[in-house]
């Protein structure tokens, strides 16, 4: 499936959830009685899918019809992986795994650009949270210039727990922080590595930052205090690629 798909109506929505297809979110019209969509809430909760209550007019606009029964589902532009899937893939590789985790990247163009850089730098997977972050949408697919087809993306319920699991599998976690003392070029990316890039404005969340083994910064020589998240991510990923693939003369 290459384009985001919208499905509406109670029965089609609940069947889409049960089918196991990759889902970005579900909209329920404000004012709908909980009992009217009880089955949908139960199925969504089982699978950790976000349900948002929104004005009915937004459903009318998205579905391009008023016959949506107050329920609408957005299917992902591409299938998601699980964290276990990424770990299983890396166990089959000869090189140390190299992942990046995006803590709250909300701009789909930034996410698409990061996927493009991840493909170019040879990363083995990208992790995004299920909530408060850009999902895989057509805008992301377009910005990725096709990289969405080649870079595995895992959608994570709890980033802190995922980091704990990665550490148990031998990963070192490198986070970005403008106040860090270590230059990003001083870190060692040759081991099993997880990079963590934070939200465009707020940076890495406190709980995730506390889980990082190292915090690094990108030195800024000009007047602006920080770089765009996708640019910062690209610099760190390519530093990792440089260390893993040194020039041989």
Image (cartoon, helix red, strand yellow):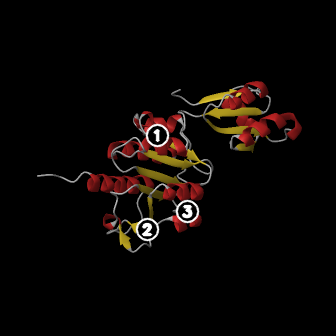
Badge 1: residue crowd in 10 Å (few <14, some 14–19, many ≥20): many
Badge 2: residue crowd in 10 Å (few <14, some 14–19, many ≥20): many
Q: Is residue 237 visible?
A: yes
Residue 129: image x %, image y %? 58, 50
Rendered image quadrant of residue 181? bottom left
The residue pinned by badge 1 equals 152
Tell me which residue sits at (49%, 65%) in the image.
212
* Image-based side of 208 in relation to 122, left or right: right
In this rendering, is residue 116 above or below 167? above
Q: Secondary structure at mark 3?
A: helix
Q: Is residue 61 visible?
A: no
> In 3D space, how far apart are the residues under numbered discs 2 and 3 (Cα atoms)?
12 Å
Check if mark 2's residue and mark 1's residue have beta carbons within 8 Å: no
Q: Secondary structure at mark 2?
A: strand
Residue 81 is marked as none
> In 3D space, how far apart are the residues under numbered discs 2 and 1 (Cα atoms)?
25 Å
First of labels 1, 3 by sequence position: 1
* Image-based side of 193 in relation to 48, left or right: left
The residue pinned by badge 3 equals 208
* Image-based side of 35 in relation to 181, left or right: right
First of labels 2, 3 by sequence position: 3
Residue 55: image x %, image y %? 76, 41
In this rendering, is residue 101 above or below 80? below
Tell me which residue sits at (80%, 29%) in the image.
69
Residue nearest the observer in this picture, 240 or 2: 240
Rendered image quadrant of residue 51? top right
First of labels 2, 1 by sequence position: 1
Check if mark 2's residue and mark 3's residue have beta carbons within 8 Å: no
Residue 214 is marked as 2
């Amino acid at each position: 499936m290459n384009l985001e798909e919208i499905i509406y109506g109670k029965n089609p929505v609940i069947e889409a959830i049960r089918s196991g297809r990759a889902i970005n979110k579900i909209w329920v019209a404000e004012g709908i009685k909980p009992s009217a969509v009880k089955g949908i809430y139960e199925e969504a909760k089982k699978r950790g899918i976000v349900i948002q209550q929104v004005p009915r007019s937004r459903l009318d606009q998205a579905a391009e019809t008023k016959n949506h029964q107050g329920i609408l589902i957005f299917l992902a532009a591409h299938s998601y992986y699980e964290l276990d899937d990424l770990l299983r893939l890396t166990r089959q590789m000869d090189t140390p795994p190299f992942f990046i985790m995006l803590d709250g990247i909300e701009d789909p163009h930034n996410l698409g650009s990061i996927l493009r850089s991840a493909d170019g730098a040879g990363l083995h997977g990208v992790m995004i949270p299920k909530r408060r972050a850009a999902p895989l949408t057509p805008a992301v697919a377009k910005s990725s210039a096709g990289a969405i087809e080649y870079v595995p993306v895992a959608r994570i319920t709890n980033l802190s727990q995922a980091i704990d699991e990665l550490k148990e599998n031998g990963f070192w976690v490198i986070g970005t922080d403008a106040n860090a003392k270590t230059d990003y070029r001083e870190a060692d990316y040759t081991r099993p590595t997880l990079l963590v890039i934070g939200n465009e404005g707020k940076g890495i969340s406190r709980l995730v930052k506390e889980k990082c083994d190292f915090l690094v910064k990108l030195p800024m020589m000009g007047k602006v205090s920080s770089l765009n998240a996708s640019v910062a991510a690209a610099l760190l990923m390519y530093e990792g690629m440089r260390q893993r693939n040194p020039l041989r003369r």
